[in-house]
Image (cartoon, rainbow, N blue to C red):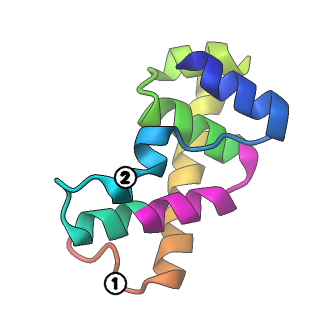
């Protein structure tokens, strides 16, 4: 799992979504709205600067703790926390610009 992220960064300079997320739209047990929300988030993640995308990917997709992500990225944990916060903010802005009202009722 960790190798997937490392390999993706080395080969392409960016992190790609793992197969189970990338193909979430093919899972019949998910309803249409959930698949659509996942697609919106995936698309928005691709627009994030790589340093935000990598931190978000490791913590929220791969399930790393902040300290583990910091070791993986070779950064202080405070830097990873900052990138997570700013990455979430940037992700929210991208999604809201494309899909106004997307986050209504989620705060």
Dot 2, how many residues are within 10 Å of its Cα: few (below 14), some (14-19), or many (20+)?
A: some
Q: Nearer the viewer, mark 1 or mark 2?
A: 2
Residue 99 location (% of width, % of height): 44, 83
The region drawn magenta spans 39-50
Query: Is residue 34 at all visible to an observer of this figure?
Result: yes
Q: Check if residue 94 falls in the magenta segment.
A: no
For residue 83, side relative to residue 97 (left or right): right
Which residue, given by chain and number where applicable, does mark 2 sit on?
A: 24
Could you say whether the residue bearing mark 1 is in a helix, strand or loop? loop
Q: Nearer the viewer, residue 19 or 101?
A: 19
Q: Name the residue rendered at 58%, 51% in the picture.
A: 87
Could you say whether the residue bearing mark 2 is in a helix, strand or loop? helix
Q: Nearer the viewer, residue 46 or 7?
A: 7
Q: Is residue 6 above or below residue 43?
A: above
**Which secondary structure dominates the residues rendered in magenta?**
helix
For residue 25, side relative to residue 92 (left or right): left
Q: Check if residue 41 falls in the magenta segment.
A: yes
To which quarter of the image does residue 48 belong?
bottom right
Residue 68 location (% of width, % of height): 53, 14
Count of marks, rendered view:
2
Q: Nearer the viewer, residue 72 or 29?
A: 29
Which residue, given by chain and number where applicable, does mark 1 sit on?
A: 101
Residue 26 location (% of width, % of height): 34, 56
Q: Tag on residue 5?
A: none
């Amino acid at each position: 799992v960790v190798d997937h992220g490392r390999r993706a960064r080395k080969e392409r300079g960016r992190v790609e979504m793992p197969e189970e997320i990338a193909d979430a739209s093919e899972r019949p047990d998910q309803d249409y709205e959930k698949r659509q929300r996942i697609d919106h988030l995936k698309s928005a993640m691709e627009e994030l600067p790589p340093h935000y995308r990598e931190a978000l990917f490791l913590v929220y997709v791969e399930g790393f703790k902040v300290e583990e992500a910091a070791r993986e990225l070779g950064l202080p944990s405070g830097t990873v926390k900052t990138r997570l916060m700013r990455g979430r903010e940037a992700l929210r802005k991208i999604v809201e610009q494309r899909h106004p009202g997307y986050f209504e009722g989620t705060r």
